[in-house]
Image: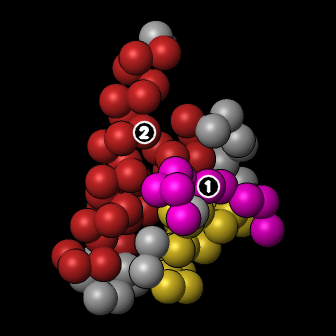
């Protein structure tokens, strides 16, 4: 994937993470779109996951994603507006 395409996808995913709390207060109730977005974010970071199978919202723009391969990641937006993925 070209660098420009990666940036575009990252911008779209970031926008989705900002909009997700307004779409559903409980990501478990409507977790499919959030899980797909988090799967894409984790893949763009080059981290192993496969597919996100469950999502737990910790705060606004702050999620714990559990992957089908057993990995867990915290996906959040930092003060600079960048998406950060940390292995749990």
- Residue at image coords 71%, 43%: 48
Residue 4, compared with residue 64, is above or below; it is above
Residue 4 magenta-highlighted = no
Residue 85 magenta-highlighted = yes
Disc 1, SS? strand
Q: Position of residue 34 (x, y in %)?
A: 37, 64
- Residue at image coords 73%, 59%: 86
- Which residue is at the front of the view, 13 or 67? 13
Residue 54, compared with residue 57, is above or below; it is above
- Which residue is at the front of the view, 65 or 45? 45
Q: Position of residue 8 (x, y in %)?
A: 34, 30
Residue 21 seen in render? yes
Relative to 24, is 54 on the left or the right? right
Residue under label 1, please give it: 84
Residue under label 2, please give it: 10
Q: Quadrant of residue 44?
A: top right
Q: Position of residue 87 (x, y in %)?
A: 78, 60
Residue 68 seen in render? no
- Which residue is at the front of the view, 84 or 53? 84
User: If you read the primary sequence from the N terminus, does the residue marked by circle 2 or circle 1 appear first?
Assistant: 2
Mark 1 nearby-residue class (10 Å; few <14, some 14–19, many ≥20):
some
Distance in Å between CA atoms under marks 2 and 1:
11 Å
Q: Which residues are magenta?
A: 79-88
Disc 2, SS? helix
Residue 15, compared with residue 29, is above or below; it is above
Relative to 64, is 87 on the left or the right? right
Residue 55, compared with residue 77, is above or below; it is below
Q: Quadrant of the C terminus?
A: bottom right
- Residue at image coords 30%, 54%: 15
Q: Quadrant of residue 4?
A: top left
Extreme residue toward the front, this view: 80
């Amino acid at each position: 994937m070209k660098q420009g395409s990666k940036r575009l996808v990252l911008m779209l995913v970031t926008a989705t993470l900002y909009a997700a709390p307004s779409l559903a207060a409980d990501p478990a109730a409507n977790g499919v779109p959030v899980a797909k977005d988090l799967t894409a974010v984790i893949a763009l970071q080059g981290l192993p996951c496969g597919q996100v199978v469950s999502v737990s919202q910790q705060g606004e723009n702050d999620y714990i994603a559990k992957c089908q391969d057993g990995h867990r990641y915290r996906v959040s937006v930092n003060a600079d507006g960048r998406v950060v993925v940390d292995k749990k």
